[in-house]
Image (spheres, grey):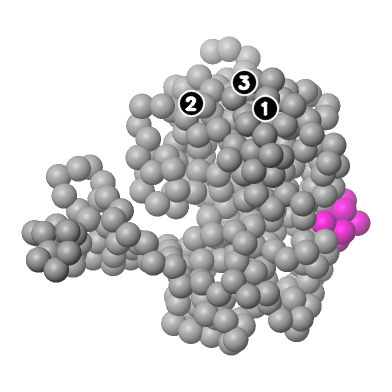
Amino acid sequence: MDDVRQQLLRLVPQLAGRKVLVVGDLFLDRYIVGKASRLSREAPIPVLEFVRQFDVPGGAANPAQNICALGGEATVVGLVGDDEAGTQLLSLLRQAHINPSGVVVDSERPTTTKTRILAEGSLRFPQQVARIDHVDRREVSKETQNELIARIGNLVPTVDAVLVSDYQAGVADQAVIRAAQFISNTQGKMSTVDAQGSFHKYTQFDLIKGNRQEIEAFLSCQLQKEEDYQLAGTQLLSELSANAVIITRGAEGLSLVSRSEGYHHFPAANRTEVFDVTGAGDTVIAVATLAAIAGASFVTAAQLANLAAGWVVRKLGNAVVTADQLAWAVGNWQA
């Protein structure tokens, strides 16, 4: 076994016990599964006969789940409504061993709920045919904003890093982000973010993640050749005063640009068993954050995160990777 694999295998158990505060937009992901019985006479769509329904935590709860699945400890700061979906989401967080002590209940907003309609048939997994989002994108009130900042201030001293998961549903506004960055910096804690395109808000974070399309839109450029990715990452490092940038590239894997380690590209670890890419970016930022606070370089953290993403795309929905599964990926896929 080569030195890189041995290094990554030694790193996997070191992820356990690391404590991360996840700040961001919490969703309830609801799945309604039906069996296609016939075509509707009302419209050219299938009629689905109900089979089952299930709920899972989504949004910022997904990187938190990945942290817990690898033996880490995740505490979340976010919002839920004073409604049935909020009660269900809080229950699911606890079931996943995620600490919900930073969650604020806002009676003026509904809990963001994403309902996916899946058709079950002869294929291995049900196929998504529609999605209905129940989301309030208004700015949060000043009172709620102050409560979120207070929760961050209370919780940062208890963790090793702060991870922001920005799904652009109200929680990660400028004031909350600046407070999270300032408090984490003052406390000497690492700060990481999955910016989802809103890069302008995230200056002076240690590690910033975005996908190719988001970075193309932000920098008004086209990422085609390797030098394009290197130049884009270098520009982001400069403009955002970051220490490292991860650019996820779908079937092409991911690229890393680091102030101390330069540019690296890691091809996709798994190209043959890709079913659902939902949540793969959440896995990347979660695993990279855990690896970095465990003492790994950004290059090693990106390698491990790339392997973790290759595992979760084999699963339906917001999937996670366990330590055993990640160790298997390290041993069997090209790092």
Q: Which mark is residue 229?
A: 1
x%, y% of residue 151? 75, 72
Question: Marks 3 and 1, how far apart in space?
Answer: 7 Å
Q: Amino acid at mark 1?
A: Tyr
Q: Which residue is mark 3?
A: 225
Q: Is residue 319 above or below residue 55?
A: above
The kind of secondary structure element at disc 3 is loop
Where 194 falls versus 292 (above or below)?
Answer: below
Rounded to the nearest whole Å, what is the CA distance between mark 2 and mark 1? 19 Å
Please give the name of the residue rendered at 48% of the width and 79% of the height, measured from the top-left corner: 87
Q: Nearer the viewer, residue 77 or 154?
A: 77
**Does the stretch in magenta take in 183?**
yes
- Asked if residue 116 can be seen in this view, the reply is yes
Badge 3 amino acid? Lys
Q: Is residue 81 above or below residue 314?
A: below
- Residue 190, numbered label: none
Q: Position of residue 157 (x, y in %)?
A: 81, 61
Quadrant where the N terminus is found in the figure: top right
Query: Which amino acid lies under the numbered mark 2 shown in the image of this protein?
Result: Ala
Magenta includes 243?
no
Is 34 situated left or right of 215 in this image? left
Q: Residues within 10 Å of mark 3 (few under 14, many from 20)?
A: few
Q: Where does the magenta region start and end?
A: 181-188
The numbered disc on residue 269 is: 2
Asked if the residue at tag 1 contacts the one at tag 3, i.e. Cβ–Cβ closer than 8 Å, the answer is yes
Mark nearer the N terminus (2 vs 1): 1
